[in-house]
Image (cartoon, helix red, strand yellow):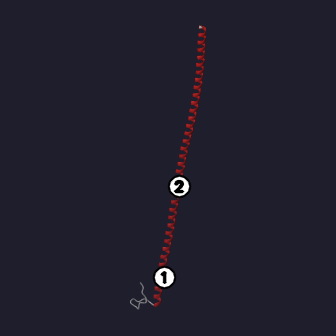
Amino acid sequence: VAVVVVAVTVAVVVVVAVVVVFVAVLLVIVMVLLVFVVVLVLVKVLVVVAVVVVVVVAVVVLVVVVVVVLVAVVVVVVLVVVLVAVVVVVVAVAVLVEVVAVVVEVVTVVLEVVVAVEVVTVVMEVVVAEVDGPCVVGGPGRCVLG
């Protein structure tokens, strides 16, 4: 009986030991699998975070480039408008100078014509006076010089 009790006890101890070892091995396998899953999830999360960071940086760079291009376009447009305004002012001043020169020329010609008419009038009066005879002060009034 004692041998049977010892044999059963040893058998129970061996079975319990085998079960404990089996459970321990299963727990180690489960822990390894959990660590592997956690590492995979972390890697996926890190990849997603990295992709999001790259996308955000790319969008920020794109916005900066667009803003720089828009500022450059505005500067070029302003410079072109200023250049056109300067050209228009220069052309207007040149046209105004030409108009003033033409007006001065016309006034000069008119004054020359007036002076010529005055000279011709005086000469004609002298010629008429010489033809009519000498001028007599207080005479019949045909010769009035002067």
Q: Residues within 10 Å of mark 1 (few under 14, many from 20)?
A: few
Mark 2 or mark 1: which is in front?
Answer: 2
Residue that label 2 marks: 77
Q: Residue furthest front?
A: 1
Q: Position of residue 26 (x, y in %)?
A: 59, 23
Name the residue: 57% across, 28% down: 34
Give the residue type at disc 1.
Val
Along the viewing direction, whichever of 62 and 9 lies nearer the viewer: 9
Disc with the residue nearer the chain's start (2 vs 1): 2
Q: Nearer the viewer, residue 34 or 49?
A: 34
Residue 130, given in percent of the width and then of the height, sits at 46, 88
Find residue 104 and name its label. none
Q: Where 33 falls versus 93 (above or below)?
A: above
Q: Position of residue 14 (x, y in %)?
A: 60, 15
Q: Which residue is mark 1?
A: 120
Front residue (pair 119, 8): 8
Residue at left offset 59%, top offset 15%? 12
- Image quadrant in which you'd find residue 46: top right
Single out the residue that lies furthest toward the left.
138
Q: Is residue 121 left or right of residue 39?
A: left
> x, y percentage for residue 101?
50, 69
The N terminus: image quadrant: top right
Question: The residue tagged with tag 1: helix, strand or loop?
Answer: helix
Picture residue at 54% right of the left edge, 48% below the top: 66
Q: Identify the residue at the far top of this view.
A: 2
Q: Amino acid at mark 2?
A: Val
Label 2, label 1: how far apart the Cα atoms are: 64 Å
Q: Residue at x 56, y 35 (%)?
A: 45
